[in-house]
Amino acid sequence: MKLKSHSIRTRLIQFMLVVTTIPLVLSLIITLIHTRESIKEQSISENAKLIFQGKTNLVNYLNNINRASIIVYSDPHFIGNLSKSLDDYQAIAEIYSTMQNLQGSLPDIQQVYLHSRITNQSTLITSSVPRREVREAPYEGVAKYMTTQAPTSTEPPHRVHNYGFPPSPLEKTDREVFTFYRSINRIPSTTQLAVLAIDVKLDGIAAICNQLYEAGDEQLYLVSDQGDIIYSGNKDEIGKSLKSLGLSEKLAVPRGDQSGYVDKDKAMQIYERLEVPFANWTLIKQIPHAALYQRSTELIKINAIIAALALLAVILGTLVISIRITRPIKQLASYMNEIQTGRLNINIEVKSQDEIGTLSRRFRQMMDTINNLILRKYKLELANQTNQIRALQAQIDPHFLYNALQSIGTLALQHNVPRIYTLLTSLAEMMRYKMRSNEAKVTLQDEVNHLKMYLDLQKERFDEQFDTTWELAPNSLSAAIPKMTLQPLVENYFKHGMDPRLGAGRLSIRSRIDEANSKRLIIEIENNGTSIPEEELHVLQASLTAHHQEGEEQRVEEGASIGLHNVLMRLQLYSEDQASLKIENLEPHGVRVTLDYIWESE
């Protein structure tokens, strides 16, 4: 099926693709951005709380080690025993006992080392046999972490050693530990009496840190202020520096900030500093973007698949809809081509109920109207020709009667009877008005003049038993209406409604032009005669309504008065069915006839 670029189908498909693709793409982009931001904010909030809890646990863990080391001050004999002679075995035993209590106070303590600066005695307490010897200075490396400004400090993770003592076959030397140092001073002075070193296994720190991240997708680091790695998910990195591993640039920790996050190119980092004087460590959790946005990426993929399916459905739906639109249009165009050839009575079949079907039905109604107008025009021309023939056939007799009436009127004047002359003149003018066969439509003023002469004769007939009220808008008198319209409407009053028992008769004739439409003429004729029986009124109203809706035509027999149906038919013929005739009863008695007619200028 070849689509033309200017066809409705092509344009509809292009339009639907544009209005569908652009919102879908924008929706995917906005959804991706919004989802990622939401995931980012949620992840920062959740992990910040998690890291803070981890920091709290680590601080409590280190404080427990610090509190365990204060046992040397809790023992009242410990400070005194440090200055006693090396031969005082009771003092040495008490020192051993205090250090063993310290070594057993926490399960993660590997060993405890003590060097007395008074006696130069070094003591090592392990899980095996305790050892001691005299040295001029503590084990090398201890002094690096012991200063007078900081009574406590920590050494980053390192391989456990025996502080210069001979190794024992029962001790494990492949374990990683970090060392807690405490300077034992003579309180309240700052004089250092001894140096205490506590080697702590990393199991406790690992147990806390392992709960703070998901291995495989995320990474966790516990880093000292000097850049040494206290803990890492990769055991090979523990005890090494960030610089040696090339991680100093990858792990961005702003100086001075206690907590926060840094969003790098490929990962999100959330950090918390441990507020411990002897362990200025920082806990860093690294979440790669691939793991962080994994759910959003999967959601976007699902949305993209749904969008593609929706786009495909739109294309197929557009094709189906466009075919249903263009096919009736082509069929309607073929009907128009046949009408153009002269086949005005073609049968237009309409099956669809959509807008195109409505258009086709309106087109069919338009063709029916055109055919009816052509038929009506033909009937009007035929009626005019018939009226002209009848007028020619009856031309001699009316002229004879008219001249005879004029002669009788002259004779009445000669005998001084002016009333007879007036009545004969009115009758003659009425006959002349009817003889004007070349006029199908006249002005309302002409009709009113004719009606006044008719009422003048009726007054003579009924001995002045009724009165007429005229309320005619001046701008309505120039309106064009079919000839002999008003007399049949008034004539019914004298035939059926006038009753001397109801009192003096009254006729009211009003006319006006509608304010909204200057071509709409409204005429009301009221009388106070006998009302129409309700059953007959309903039949008459229904008949007039059917006549108005269906264009029903009723033949007027020769010699009969022109009835209400004939008046309505002639009004509709001259106004393209834009005329109505309504009849209703009045209270307490009487009848009102309302004529609503849209007239056209000649």
Image (cartoon, rainbow, N blue to C red):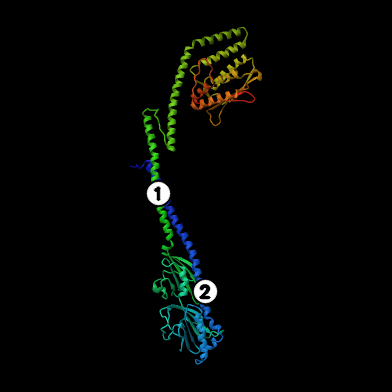
Q: Distance between the residues labelled 2 and 1?
A: 59 Å
The answer to which of 487 and 302 lies nearer the viewer is 302
Point 38% across, 28% down: residue: 343
State which quarter of the image contains the N terminus.
Answer: top left
Residue assigned mark 2: 60
Q: Is residue 509 visible?
A: no
Task: Identify the amino acid type marked 1.
Answer: Leu
- Residue 286 shows up from this direction: yes
The answer to whether marks 2 and 1 mark residues whose Cβ atoms lie closer than 8 Å is no
Left or right relative to 449: residue 226: left
The amino acid at mark 2 is Asn
- Residue underneath mark 1: 311
Residue 587: give x, y in percent of width and height: 64, 26
Image coordinates for residue 237, horizontal then vertical, percent = 40, 73
Q: How many labels does the image show?
A: 2
Q: Which secondary structure, mark 2? A: helix
Classed neighbour count for the residue bearing mark 1: other residues with Cα under 10 Å, few (<14), some (14–19), many (≥20): some
| Residue 430 drawn above or below residue 317 | above
Using the rendered view, name the quadrant where residue 542 is placed. top right
Instruction: Identify the element where label 1 is drawn.
Output: helix
Q: Position of residue 565 (x, y in %)?
A: 52, 22
Q: Which residue is drawn at 57% across and 13% down?
A: 425
The percent position of residue 179, horizontal first and vertical second, equals 46, 79
